[in-house]
Amino acid sequence: MSENNAMTLAPKKSFLKRNLPVVSTAGPISIWMIIFVMLPLLYILFISFMSRDVYGNIEYTFTTDNYKEMIQPLYLKVIWKSLKLAFLTTVICLVVGYPLAYYIASKPSKLAAKLLMLVMIPYWTSSLVRLFSINQLGMPNGFLNLLLLKLGIVSEPVDFLFSDGIVIMGLLTAMLPFSVLPLYSSIEKLDKSLLEASKDLGANPAKTFIKVTIPLTMPGIVGCVLLVFIPSLGMYYVPEMLGGGKVMLIGTLIKNQFLMTKNWPFGASLAILLILITLAMMWIYTRVGKLDELEVG
Amino acid sequence: MKMRKKFLALALSGLMVFSLAACGGGGDSGDSKDAGEVNVYMWSDYMSQKMVDKFTEETGIKVNFSYMSTSEEATAKITSGGGEQYDLVMPCDADMTGLIKGGYLEEINLENIPNLKNLGDAYKNREFDPENKYAIPYFMNYVYVIYNEKTCPVEIDEYKDLLDPKLKGQIASVTGIRNLFPVALVSLGYDPNSTNDKEIKEAYEWLQKYVANVTLFDSDSAEKLIINGGASVGLFFDGQASRAFDAAENLKVAELKDAIQLGVDEFVIPKGAKNKENAEKFLNFILDAQNMADNMQDDHLYSCPNEAAVALMPDSYKKHPAIDIPTKMKENYFLQLDIGDAAKTYDKYWTMLMSEENQ
């Protein structure tokens, strides 16, 4: 009985005490997020149901046309292409990043820290600067072509730039560390004795990798996929800079609605779609990756 | 009691965050009491600092600049309450109708701007602003074709020549719906500002062939490909063309039979501007023939509607190949006009154009 009493009285007395840690730790960022993320997003959601007047201003009459508009094959094609490029980027990041992370994790921790640093160093410069240098290197009279011509490997300058391929390259250079870091942190936690146990029980290395290593490092893989796929989907300056203005992805499409066509409502509805795709992806990944049951590295 | 304090502290810190962010945009509002100031939002590297200093010296008015990177940004600033931050903004003429009809602009008091007389007649009382109440033209730009005499495989005297398959991957080009569709429409013999679905569709089909020949679309720096040999033909703004002429040889302006696009950068005063009179003083100052000529001498190679100022310029300007294009071409120009709801149709075709496999 007395215990029960204490329970019901406790909240009143210690309401502040219980909440102080939350308010003081999560409070500032919450205010920040409300002002700079939630309110703008609500605004975007709001104008996505408005219309565009003849002069490109927002007209405050309710409509769902913006969402119906999106279902046209033309826009679905752009969305599909964006998903495809983001998917390819993610797969390549995984295929390249996983072995690298595995290699680094197999080294003694001091060396591993240095190797990780090497992965990070290029990212101390702005990604725009790196994209510009890719751009310059690939020019018809750029370094790569000069080298190939001097070595006699090619007789005419090669057209490196302005294609889907170079856009994926650009996305890769922007995204690679985001794949290596989560992979490293979960591979590093991998209990090596489990691998030995698998070997002792007669599994060959391939089977051990598929049955033991991959499931145990799944949190890292999921983290990598989330960190790479989602940003590559919306990143618009990479195709802008490397695609020669000819590769239309959803990011560029949204930008055009806001800046070129001045159809803010339609741009807003595309932005909402992008957010929904992202949320759907996260939902699928948390299901598939069973994130709730695993400890995320 | 304690809790209230905490909330107060929290609210205060929230406010601080807010005010910090608010400081970001506009010019500083520090000592605006004495001679005052004027806040200008325009292209970067587009006005001589010497001329601005002279203005401040003469009037005591401080000029604060912020810079845009696309003309759409300027329009967006005006329509989202730009008067709070800026007294002068530089949109392009194509957006003027929307801005005027939308009521986003302050009327300019022409009594304060006697130097308006220095503008060429073609640049006063224009169609979108018949009483010249809203916009003062600053510099203007033509969009035309230049080519490398040595490497260009075809002869170009009309837009249609740009579709020649021999030019595949050879063209560096400006981009943007309103820069490219008019080229196609003119070539097809239609109104460059057409709002007719069928004509726009035909223009789209024309542009499909054009896109196949283009290696790079970029309205800021596509000329670098002409300079480094990556392209032999360029559809450029005259500013881009002048940079190409200064950096590379064997370049020529194609003498087009078709009309070329003329764009004008306008100064406007956004609704609610706080230093309207200072803005007018500044406009009058830069419209002065000598001041504008000094402004252009400072390595600014742009076509200028201020005819009195152009008359004062040396030959290095007047005879520059990017500026001194044939009079026939200069006279045969078209402007971007408001296209209303057709903008959506254009955008659809533009998205189609750019999402096709173009490589």
Image: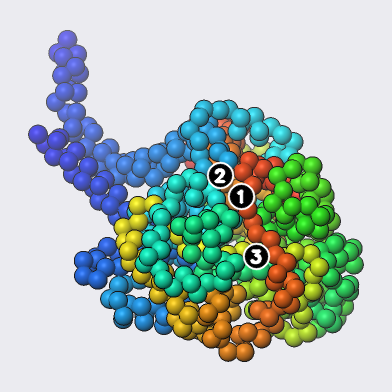
Q: Amino acid at mark 2?
A: Tyr
Judge by depth and name the residue closer to the eye, A66 or B79: B79
Residue B51, quarter of the rendered image: bottom left
Instruction: Name the chain under label 2.
Output: A
- How far apart in space, not on screen, are marks 1 and 3 (Cα)? 14 Å
Query: Badge 1: how crowded within 10 Å, few (<14), some, or many (20+)?
Result: many
- How far apart in space, not on screen, are marks 3 and 2 (Cα)? 21 Å
- Of the numbered discs in the image, which one, if any, rests on residue A55? 2
Residue at 31 percent across and 72 percent down: it is: B62
Q: For the residues tagged 1 and 3, is the chain the same?
A: yes
Q: Amino acid at mark 3?
A: Leu
- Of the numbered discs in the image, which one, if any, rests on residue B241? none
Q: Circle 1 sits on which residue?
A: B338
Judge by depth and name the residue closer to the eye, A60 or A134: A60
- How far apart in space, not on screen, are marks 1 and 2 (Cα)? 8 Å
Residue contact at pointers 1 and 3, CB within 8 angstroms: no
Residue at 32 percent across and 64 percent down: it is: B277
**Which is more N-terminal, label 3 or label 1?**
3
User: In the image, is B81 to the left or to the right of B29?
Assistant: right
Residue contact at pointers 1 and 2, CB within 8 angstroms: yes
Residue B290 x, y percent position in the rendering: 46, 83
